[in-house]
Image (cartoon, grey):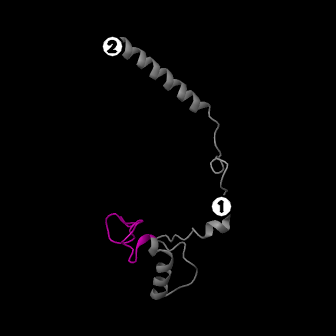
Amino acid sequence: MFRFNVVAAVLVITLGMGWQKGLATAPEAHPIMGYGFGHAPSDRELQGWDIDVRPTGAGLPAGQGTVSQGATVFAGKCASCHGATGREGPMDRLVGGQGTLAS
């Protein structure tokens, strides 16, 4: 039984060393196109996702708006991820204290 355990341990170590060597010699993939599918997004494609607004107001369009206009924008661009009142999720809660963006 002891001999079997020693042989098994040597086999596992040998295979493990070979596996690590294979990883070390694997070609490095390009971070965007490494697997031969997909493409780097264009600026136009990114514009649809670049909708964040910082607490300082950065990211808002120039000018001013009303609360009702803001509610319309929130309903159309934010509520699907943050909930109707900013508390429901599934993404980060925007208001409500502990566990929100303010804490």
The stretch drawn in magenta includes residue 94: yes
Query: Residue beneath label 1, please?
Result: 41
Q: Is residue 43 above or below residue 29?
A: below
Name the spot of residue 93 as percent of width and height, x first: 38, 68
Name the spot of residue 84 as percent of width and height, x first: 40, 77
Badge 1 local density, few (<14 within 10 Å), some, or many (20+)? few
The stretch drawn in magenta includes residue 83: yes
Residue 83 left/right relative to 32: left
**Amino acid marked by disc 2:** Met
Residue that appears at 62% across and 69% down: 47
Mark 1–mark 2 distance (CA, rounded to whole Å): 59 Å
**Amino acid marked by disc 1:** Pro
Name the spot of residue 3 as percent of width and height, x first: 37, 11
Q: Is residue 14 above or below residue 42?
A: above
Q: Quadrant of the N terminus?
A: top left
Badge 2 local density, few (<14 within 10 Å), some, or many (20+)? few
Q: Is residue 33 above or below residue 26?
A: below
Residue that appears at 67% across and 68% down: 44
Residue that appears at 36% across and 66% down: 100
Query: Residue beneath label 2, please?
Result: 1
Query: Secondary structure under badge 1?
Result: loop
In this view, the residue in front, 97 or 77, is: 77
The label nearer to you, 1 versus 2, is 2
Range covered by the magenta-colored residues: 81-103
In terms of image quadrants, where is residue 95? bottom left
Is most of the magenta stretch helix, strand or loop? loop
Give whichever of discs 1 and 2 has the lower sequence position. Answer: 2
Residue 10 left/right relative to 61: left
Name the spot of residue 21 as percent of width and height, x first: 57, 27
Query: Secondary structure under badge 2?
Result: loop
